[in-house]
Image (cartoon, coloured by chain):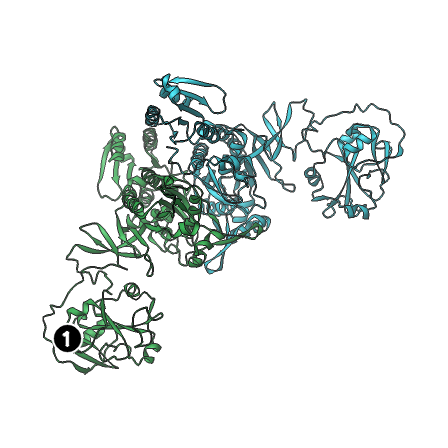
Chain colours: A green, B cyan
Amino acid sequence: MKYSKLFGKTRLKAPHDAQSVNAGLLSQAGFIDKVAAGIYSFLPLGLRVLHKINAIIRDEMDKAGGQEILMPALHPQELWEITGRTRTMDDVLYRTRGAGNKDFIFGASHEEAVTPLAAKFVQSYKDLPFSVYQIQTKFRDEPRAKSGLLRGREFGMKDMYSFHRDEKDLDEYYEKIKRTYLNVYERCGMKAYIVEASGGAFSDKFSHEYSIVTPAGEDSIIIDTKTGHAQNTEIATGKIKNPSDNEERELPMKEVKIERGLTVEENAKAHKVEPWRILKSVVYKVDGAPPGRDLRRGEGFLGVAIRGDLSINEHKLEKYLGKPVKAASAEELSELKLVRGFISPVDQPNLRFIADHSIKNVKNFVTGANRLNHDLVNVNEGRDFIIDDFTDLVLLDENALDGGDGHKVEKAVEAGNIFKLGTKYSTAFGLMYTDEEGKQHPVVMGCYGIGNTRLVGTIVEASHDENGIIWPKSVAPYLVHLVSLGNDDNVLAGAEKLYGELNEKGVEVLYDDRNESAGKKLKDADLIGIPLRLVLSARTLKEDAVEWKVRGEKEVRMVGLGDIVDKVAEFAKS
Amino acid sequence: MKYSKLFGKTRLKAPHDAQSVNAGLLSQAGFIDKVAAGIYSFLPLGLRVLHKINAIIRDEMDKAGGQEILMPALHPQELWEITGRTRTMDDVLYRTRGAGNKDFIFGASHEEAVTPLAAKFVQSYKDLPFSVYQIQTKFRDEPRAKSGLLRGREFGMKDMYSFHRDEKDLDEYYEKIKRTYLNVYERCGMKAYIVEASGGAFSDKFSHEYSIVTPAGEDSIIIDTKTGHAQNTEIATGKIKNPSDNEERELPMKEVKIERGLTVEENAKAHKVEPWRILKSVVYKVDGAPPGRDLRRGEGFLGVAIRGDLSINEHKLEKYLGKPVKAASAEELSELKLVRGFISPVDQPNLRFIADHSIKNVKNFVTGANRLNHDLVNVNEGRDFIIDDFTDLVLLDENALDGGDGHKVEKAVEAGNIFKLGTKYSTAFGLMYTDEEGKQHPVVMGCYGIGNTRLVGTIVEASHDENGIIWPKSVAPYLVHLVSLGNDDNVLAGAEKLYGELNEKGVEVLYDDRNESAGKKLKDADLIGIPLRLVLSARTLKEDAVEWKVRGEKEVRMVGLGDIVDKVAEFAKS
């Protein structure tokens, strides 16, 4: 392809409304164009990348026994009413009404399409197991769509669904696809981690996410560098830092008058102690009394204590309670006769308190005295206050993590997820099979998603530098970016000849044949990010050579024109 | 692929609600599944066909210099307001409202997306010409969606758009794509005719349709067998049958009393004349007085006379008047004091009459006397009645066509169309370029569509028999349908071996390995319609051979197992 003819050239700068690295670089480099928030056109360069990713996905799904199908985007609303997702996903559904007042939902997901489809073809255990997948557009009315291709309102997805006679068969297939997914990311040039996902605070859904590490990631994950497994900090458990030896003697508690700010840091500074010495107390309003737990004291409120240098993981707290929580408002605190910033579990007959395990390792805490500008020092659990229950409530972030056991925290982008759906959808749609004894059972299902357009964005987030994108070879729009510098006839003829030779060898070449400055052409090459840049100029021609530079590497070297086609072929295979 | 594992098996019969040949056969054979009227899932077999068609389309568009892109389906409504198609296409648009009360239209076409996109990249004449295309889903709320894949509410389309500096450049490219389109159909195994399209009654849009001849076609086209060009009967002009020599003497007109039916046939029978002797008169209500034409007489009504054996082409009539017409109702006729079935242009001072040229060649017409059960015979134009204007109003169907000049009428399905859009969209979206002198001009556009999912259905309409589909090799889901008959171990082992050998050679094989009756398996093979059927049974094994049958041919022959792989490879290339 000659760059002069390519539709979708580079722009001088990223569009002003590109709020993410991927949208900025991909737009500026001419891969995509924004139509509206979360809605993009793929230009020729971008579509080449997407097609390469699709080919890798198809190949891996086929190898895993998946059969490709294509279900429609328009779903009769009745189907979604059957599963109740007209309500549970109401916010993100695009709806329309067609001829004959028929209501449709634009597929935000395809369980409602694939399950009744499978029900038409599955009768007996002999029809199981099988799996089908599609590469199809999804429509989701995301309230915030500011992450470029990472969160689209219209986006591409590969969704696979598997159908099994029992949990055991699903489990085996699920493990197989776990590996298949790692292959996909690896072949796309990305290192992905399998993350145990939270599946929502109140869900027991079994699922895993695949995360790709990048500083721009929206999620934090904790990687076990020994196993390669990872946890989302939302639910991560693990060894936390232990700054105290817990061998101190318990000193007598006393109340002190002090003028201080309300944050832990300000508090610690005022008392001239480390933040971990502070006993942090947060009061939550619990949405309804949690079943089996006593919330009579405090009338639906709950105190939570944690070591001052740590943060409370509200997701863990909700999971523990089985109820949503919300930090109590200033008004609610004063109704409870609590003084904001000076709360402590000491002398709280009307408020139930639970705590994170972390407070067990510290003696002689500093905490509020429930009076403005009054604190208590040398406060000790068991002696000065009682905790109703200890549990793991710590947010395992970089700050909290011990790290000595090979765990580290990284920012990451989610690049896929897999779920064991069980019989939820098969029961809803009557997808049953008959076993050897003639007994009917619901089919056990799994589902497996990779956002293919999102993956384009993820790769850019993970693989770029200050000059532009750095495409992994396997998904690069072209392998070689050939650049001619200057208008010397010999240079132009030489570049044209090399372009022809490379094309003949089946090498994918983008040839920048424009009459532009060297600066502009080299800058564009870096921005576009094709793996191998070959520059031909009067200077290189003198040496009967071409300048060779691999994107993302510093080294620039000369390769003789006689060798270049072979060297490129070698590079392609490497 | 083993048929036992394939998702989407044949059904015993076509679904009861399949109202077209293509939907019936494709559903029964396991290629597609209906989700709602005009909305289908593609099962593995069907998707293989679609992917093969897509590959042919891509290859031909690339060869014609098209660059593939992918625009979104969600279009901000503002874009469609700019072109006014929110109104002109209102009926068929699916709409939705998203976050922030933003209104969207689901792309029924993509001029509103591609034109502003092009405007971002086109500045000067140097950026022209170019063409981009996409293979994308379209959404159209068709009022009637009863033709299977021929008229979908959600359907796939390849739409290409070309951009030029002037009409001349567009014309050249348009001619190039005309040939490209013929290549596409030919490579899909179909003979397509280029049909001059009507472009709507009130449009001067220049366009062509591609039609594939099939008895189930919705359209009638008139093929010029000498040139291969064709016309849609909607607008076709040409030589009509001339049953009268026009050498008759004009006889005296007289009124006769007669009891007869109201159709031309009944009328002719009662008078013992040929239908062409009847002067047929139809009264139309014209929607508003047409500009420059006198409709004062008859107050917005118009009489049209034509020879009795011919039909009035209302499309031509509307084009002539520049206004929509509607046959006058019984009530309207009586208000006009006209007697239904006995209307004639004789003695009609209050009704303007025009006529088709055909009445000029007949003397001594039979026509109504404007009184119930009274007719006039020996009626002659000029002497007994006056026609205000003669024009071509004949519907050129099989009945009317002379045929002597090499024209014939065929039923056909539209399989694509191409339009010269001119500057309509570029003007609307400010898509301008600067010429060599620095002057600004609107870009001249063309657009070129092929419904790829519709083409799947069209091929089935054009290529099937009473037993099932007959796939052209180039788009067949598999090349070979290997069938093992019986449970003999040697047969199963032989089939398995042959299946392996063919796969190894890269031949696409569907192997029916099921434990089913010979009848069922051979019936399914015919229904599915794969080009080459190979049957292995105890009987063929005795001859160390396999039974070879090409779908759509009668001949069945035996081919030695030693030769079979080579013969299949030959067949693949043939």
Q: Residue B548's image quarter?
A: top left
Q: Closer to the camera, A99 or B364? A: A99
The quadrant of the image that shows the N terminus of chain A is top left
| Residue B432 seen from this side | no
Q: Is residue B213 above or below residue A31?
A: above
> Relative to B11, is A319 on the left or the right?
left
Q: Residue B263's image quarter?
A: top right
Q: Position of residue B488 (x, y in %)?
A: 35, 25
Q: Amino acid at mark 1?
A: Asn
Q: Position of residue B556 (x, y in %)?
A: 46, 19
| Residue A408 seen from this side | yes
Q: Position of residue A238 (x, y in %)?
A: 20, 59
The quadrant of the image that shows the C terminus of chain A is top left
Q: Closer to the camera, B178 or B188? A: B188
Q: Total of numbered circles in the picture?
A: 1
Residue at the outermost front position: A437
Element under label 1? loop
Q: Position of residue A437 (x, y in %)?
A: 36, 43
Q: Is residue B341 above or below residue B428?
A: above
Q: Chain of mark 1?
A: A
Label 1 neighbourhood size at 10 Å, few (<14), some (14-19), many (20+)?
many
> Relative to B275, is A65 on the left or the right?
left
Q: Closer to the camera, A506 or B538? A: B538
Provide the residue designation for mark 1. A364
